[in-house]
Amino acid sequence: MELMLALGVGLFAACGVYLVLRARSFDLILGLTLLSYAVNLFIFATGRLAVNRPPILAPDTATTLAQYADPLPQALVLTAIVISFGMTALLVAIALAARRAGDDDHVDAGRQEPQ
């Protein structure tokens, strides 16, 4: 399970970096979204992967680390999801306004002259 998660984080990060390096606004937004998914998965994995374990202990269970999942990374990821959603909405609005104003979706100062 850890190998699959590591491969997923690496794949999301690689695709995100590739898309961020392109000069189109839609590719940039999609790349930033994939990078945020990679970071969220990485933060979630730092809390130890545990299946079918509660994040908060019940009063009648033993208080060992093997009995529960760490709730702090889960809370951080939930906050990061909300922040990345707001950031994506802002970037889409800026990209649409720039496309409407300049009739182009290049992110690097507009059109290039043919040589």
Image (cartoon, rainbow, N blue to C red):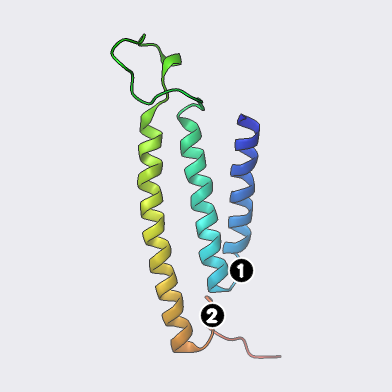
Note whether 1 is above or below 80 in the view shown.
above
Picture quarter with the C terminus: bottom right
- Residue 108 locus on image (x, y percent): 53, 77
- Residue 77 locus on image (x, y percent): 41, 42
Pointer 2 residue = 105
Going 36% across and 60% down the picture, which residue do you hit? 86
Please tell me in which quadrant of the rendered image residue 20 appears.
Answer: bottom right
Q: Amino acid at mark 2?
A: Asp
Please tell me in which quadrant of the rendered image residue 22 appears.
Answer: bottom right
Q: Nearer the viewer, residue 109 or 73?
A: 73
Note whether 105 is above or below 2 in the view shown.
below
User: In this image, 21 relative to 52: left or right?
Assistant: right
Note whether 95 is above or below 85 in the view shown.
below
Q: Amino acid at mark 1?
A: Arg
Q: Nearer the viewer, residue 88 or 108?
A: 88
Pointer 1 residue = 22
Q: Nearer the viewer, residue 99 or 57?
A: 57
- Residue 78 locus on image (x, y percent): 38, 44
Note whether 101 is above or below 4 in the view shown.
below
- Residue 46 locus on image (x, y percent): 48, 31
Going 55% across and 60% down the picture, which residue do you hit? 31
Q: Name the secondary structure under disc 1.
A: loop
Q: Spot the residue most to the left.
A: 59
Dot 2 or dot 1: first in sequence order is 1
Q: Residues within 10 Å of mark 2 (few under 14, many from 20)?
A: many
- Nearer to us of marks 2 and 1 is 2
Picture quarter with the N terminus: top right
